[in-house]
Amino acid sequence: MPTPHSVGNPAEKVKCNGVFGMNFIDNAFNANEKSLAVRAQRMEVLARNIANADTPHFKAQDVDFKQVMKNTIEAAVVTTNVNHLAQAPDETGNGLKYRIPFNVSFDGNTVELPVEQAKYGQYAAEYQTTLSILENRISGIRKALRGD
């Protein structure tokens, strides 16, 4: 029976060594999982903006991807005191922000359709990139477990 530090089949190490158990796999995919969720939320917000392009007084929104990911990383950090890394009380953590338009509309709507469409295309490409990175990570772990 292999020990946790022995050389052998990687799948056996996963079974024997607690360090390389499910926590290892969860940690490997946690950032990608959150990134995909935030990117999907961002695309939903942009789709809502596009759908409301003709709605009077509708305010265009976007998700601040960097802020949400920063909050996620800070939430994962273990602190020794509850006051460490304290966030401002008004910080919601969802990263939802109102967009400032380039041109002002007479009806108070801040959606600029060409801008929203361009952003949607950009965010869809970023979502696909994140999926590709995740697929490569999964493929790498499969190869390691098979011993390829």
Image: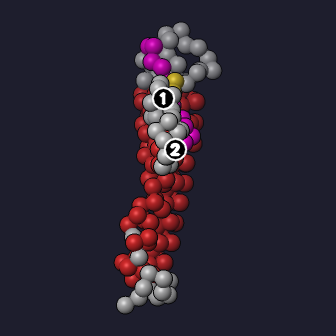
Q: Is residue 97 above or below residue 37?
A: above
Direction from residue 18 to residue 105 in the image, left or right? right
Which is more toward the observer, 30 or 137?
30
Q: Amino acid at mark 1?
A: Glu
Relative to residue 6, is residue 33 depicted above or below? above
Residue 67 highlighted magenta (yes or no): yes
Q: Residue at x 48, y 82 (%)?
A: 5
Instruction: Pick the quarter of the image with the N terminus.
Output: bottom left
- Magenta part of the protein: which range? 56-70
Residue 55: x and y, percent? Answer: 42, 17
**Position in image of residue 119 (x %, y %):** 56, 36
Q: Nearer the viewer, residue 148 or 1?
A: 1
Secondary structure of the residue carrying tag 2 is helix
Q: Residues within 10 Å of mark 2 (few under 14, many from 20)?
A: some
Q: In the image, is residue 99 above or below residue 69?
A: above
Coloring scheme used = secondary structure
Query: Looking at the rendered structure, which numbered label has been put on residue 74?
Result: 2
State yes or no: discs 1 and 2 in contact (Cβ < 8 Å): no
Q: CA distance from mark 1 to mark 2?
A: 13 Å
- Residue 25 % position (x, y): 43, 65
Q: Residue furthest front?
A: 81
Q: Residue drawn 48% across and 78% down? A: 144
Against 57, is 34 above or below? below
Label drawn at residue 127:
none
Q: Secondary structure at mark 1?
A: loop
Amino acid, disc 2: Glu
Which residue matches tag 1?
A: 91
Residue 23 seen anywhere in this rendered image of the structure = yes
Q: 122 or 77: which is nearer to us? A: 77
Residue 11 in view in this figure: no
